[in-house]
Amino acid sequence: TLVSIVIPHFNRANTIQRCLDSVLAQRYTDYECLVIDDGSQKEEIRLLEKIVGRLDDERFKIIYHPQNLGGGAARNTGIENAKGEYIAFLDSDDEWTSEKLSKQLSFMVDNRVEFSSCQSEVHYAHGINLMPIHPPHSGQKAADYLFVDGGWLPTPALMIRRQTLASVRFDES
């Protein structure tokens, strides 16, 4: 089952190597990795191309926005170019553990779910937090859980069946 990994990139040549190394380290290997350059400066694009070129792996592709449109637009471009049955999101300054794709995809297939998320370790100057810190409460609104009540759910935790996204897209404003 092909998984499309969508990574928005804007002037982050200093973090993209670590991000892509975490994709290469995945135990699940049936994926394509779409790096959407969102109008980076020329030198940053050159560095990105050099980093991706050194990988020498046809699963990695760069798609270019001629100008900066924002993370939502870059993710939408990735969705529109994805060929996988599932789409996973990763930010260019983040990284995954080596079993992220395999565990999340197995869970989704075994349980026949269209969408899943996982906990994330969030590293701060003062330490590491695990997010979300608890499951949603019964009857709790999704927006309150995701963004207010300690539930904060980053995009790198998400995997969604491509068909389920259909015409749903990230906000580009």
Image (tube, grey):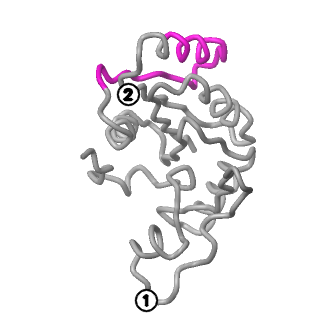
Determine whether 130 is above or below 36 in the image.
Answer: below
- Check disc 1 and report the residue beneath it: 139
Q: Residue at x 48, y 10 (%)?
A: 43
- Identify the amino acid type marked 1: Gly
Q: Residue at x 69, y 36 (%)?
A: 22
Determine whether 71 is above or below 125 in the image.
Answer: above
Q: Residue at x 38, y 28 (%)?
A: 38
- Closer-to-camera residue (125/75): 125
Between circles 1 and 2, the one closer to the viewer is 2
The percent coordinates of residue 112 (x first, y second) are 54, 66
Residue 166 included in the magenta stretch of the image: no
- Check disc 2 and report the residue beneath it: 38
Q: Is mark 2 on a helix, strand or loop?
A: strand
The percent coordinates of residue 150 (x first, y second) are 55, 72
The percent coordinates of residue 87 (x first, y second) are 48, 46
Q: What element carries label 1?
A: loop
- Closer-to-camera residue (29/157): 157
